Image (cartoon, helix red, strand yellow):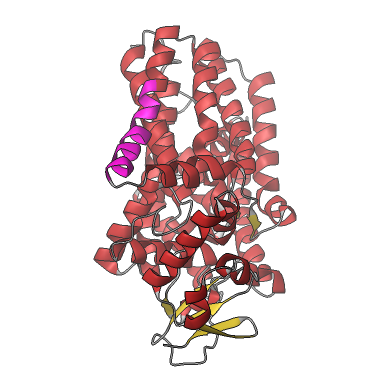
């Protein structure tokens, strides 16, 4: 594993020569940690759909490091190393391959180079570690004479923790229930135990927000509106296909070869079925994404590695195996480097990057509220905006009673006290309609409303 550690470091060197700016999701997570550390309650004082456990991590990171971009990279690196080690040990434990070695760890380290944003502290990455813990307990049930009760309990609990980190991981609840029922063969009582354990972390979050008088906001913003808010495409589907086409193709070949050419026992057949369904469910999480970007698909990596490692280990000649591994070692990082280099020089990348913008006053001396999706201006100014996810905020306000919306908007403005309001989405007039105090407080000049006091 020491070699894998240094290999990961080596792979990151070319990215340092590519001008990769701070991304908009990273800026949002930094602002989320900053607002939480300042005493603002998520989902009540800050409208965003980031998972509650992820918010806690950004909060602590803000207190300890100021949510610096370097801290995002370091913590993400530790999580990647942990996931590589755990996944490799899991495959050894369940006897997934004829030989127990570090080939899956090597393939996993290489596959993480498909996109630069795998190496950032995203909710998807944080939740993926706990989802793999749940997957480990599920796969352990394929072995003979395994005690199902502790594994079923922990399987559900870790799956629930992952959901509290990242909303799209909700798709793995039916995966755990159905595969446990039809592939593993757990009983109805154990199925109820799994579901109860899954709901436990979310129940703890609900109790906390109930005590803070924010339960309705938490349920609405995290559990309900996640199904309704349209995603923003930082990377289009063509870009995603460029990144993932080769690994998906190799995984498909690995699955076919594993099924047709390799004689598997009953345990290995169950593992093969579970990993295939796991891969397909990962693809299905696309429909629950709030932001479409490669880092959201970090949980694709373990099932891809499972099948690709089978493909690379089934060669009859050792020289053939080594040739395929070296080819994979060269091609995958080149895809990642080439994709980000090309994207960073195209206008489409501006919807992903958080590039600094000029302000009318000294940077940092003013607080800005942007009524729109683009967060660029916050990279150089103070923040006076509780509406970090504007698409979610707009949907939330549309479903509110008009009088409640006016009260919410007025109270938010009074608490945030922004010096400038950038009305990109032209919603200020409708939200502030019927509130005379705001007409006296802000003067409009085009899209910009400036505080008069």
Q: Quadrant of the C terminus?
A: bottom left
Residue 107 location (% of width, % of height) = 52, 44
Residue 315, relative to residue 331: is it above or below?
Answer: above
Q: Position of residue 126 (x, y in %)?
A: 41, 47
Q: Residue at x 35, y 38 (%)?
A: 206
Residue 94 visible here: no
Which residue is at the front of the view, 206 or 325?
Answer: 206
Q: Taking 43 as reference, is 197 above or below it?
A: above
Of the pair 150 and 431, the residue shown nearer to us: 431
Q: Nearer the viewer, residue 224 or 131?
A: 224
> Where does residue 339 sit, x and y in percent of width and height?
66, 63
Q: Is residue 48 magenta?
A: no
Q: Is residue 65 left or right of residue 8?
A: left
- Compared across the picture, whether 128 is left or right of 333 comes to left
Say whether residue 202 is magenta: yes
Determine whether, in the image, residue 299 is placed left or right of residue 319.
left
Residue furthest toward the left? 64
Q: At 47% from the left edge and 78% from the top edge, which residue is drawn?
A: 368
Query: In the image as oriented, which residue stretches furthest toward the bottom?
Result: 361
Q: Residue at x 63, y 38 (%)?
A: 283
**SS assignment for the magenta stretch, majority:** helix
Q: Indicate the quadrant where residue 152 lies.
A: top left
Residue 51 location, x and y as percent?
A: 43, 47
The image quarter in which residue 281 lies: top right
- Which span is picked out in magenta? 196-211
Residue 239 seen in this snapshot:
yes
In the depicted structure, whether residue 367 falls above or below residue 59: below
The number of numbered badges drawn on the structure is 0
């Amino acid at each position: 594993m020491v070699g894998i550690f240094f290999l990961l470091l080596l792979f990151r060197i070319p990215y340092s020569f590519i001008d990769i700016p701070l991304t908009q999701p990273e800026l949002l997570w930094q602002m989320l940690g900053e607002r939480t550390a300042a005493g603002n309650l998520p989902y009540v004082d800050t409208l965003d759909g980031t998972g509650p456990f992820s918010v806690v991590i950004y909060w602590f990171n803000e207190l300890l490091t100021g949510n610096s971009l370097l801290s995002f990279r370091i913590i993400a690196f530790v999580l990647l190393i942990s996931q590589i080690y755990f996944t490799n040990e899991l495959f050894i434990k369940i006897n997934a391959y004829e030989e127990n070695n570090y080939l899956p760890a090597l393939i996993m380290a290489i596959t993480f180079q498909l996109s630069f944003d795998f190496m950032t502290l995203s909710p998807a990455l944080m939740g993926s570690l706990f989802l793999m813990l749940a997957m480990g307990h599920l796969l352990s049930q394929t072995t003979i004479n395994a005690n199902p009760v502790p594994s079923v309990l922990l399987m559900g609990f870790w799956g629930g923790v992952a959901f509290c980190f990242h909303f799209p991981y909700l798709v793995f609840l039916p995966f755990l229930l159905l595969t446990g029922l039809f592939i593993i063969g757990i009983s109805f009582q154990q199925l109820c135990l799994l579901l109860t354990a899954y709901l436990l972390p979310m129940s703890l979050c609900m109790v906390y927000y109930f005590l803070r008088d924010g339960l309705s906001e938490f349920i609405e913003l995290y559990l309900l509106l996640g199904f309704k808010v349209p995603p923003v495409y930082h990377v289009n589907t063509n870009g995603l296909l460029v990144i993932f086409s080769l690994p998906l193709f190799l995984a498909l070949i690995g699955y076919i070869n594993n099924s047709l050419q390799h004689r598997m026992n009953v345990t290995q057949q169950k593992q093969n079925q579970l990993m295939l369904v796991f891969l397909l469910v990962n693809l299905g999480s696309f429909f629950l994404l709030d932001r479409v970007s490669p880092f959201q698909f970090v949980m694709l990596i373990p099932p891809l590695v499972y099948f690709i490692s089978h493909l690379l280990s089934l060669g009859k000649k050792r020289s053939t195996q080594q040739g395929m591994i070296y080819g994979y070692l060269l091609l995958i990082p080149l895809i990642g480097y080439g994709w980000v280099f090309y994207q960073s020089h195209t206008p489409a990348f501006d919807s992903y990057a958080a590039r600094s913008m000029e302000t009318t006053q000294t940077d940092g001396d003013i607080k800005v509220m942007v009524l729109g999706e683009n967060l660029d201006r916050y990279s150089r100014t103070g923040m006076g905006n509780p509406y970090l996810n504007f698409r979610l905020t707009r949907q939330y306000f549309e479903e509110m009673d008009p009088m409640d919306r006016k009260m919410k908007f007025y109270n938010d403005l009074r608490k945030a006290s922004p010096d400038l309001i950038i009305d990109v989405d032209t919603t200020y007039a409708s939200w502030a309609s019927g509130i005379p105090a705001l007409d006296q407080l802000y003067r409009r000049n085009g899209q910009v409303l400036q505080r008069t006091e």
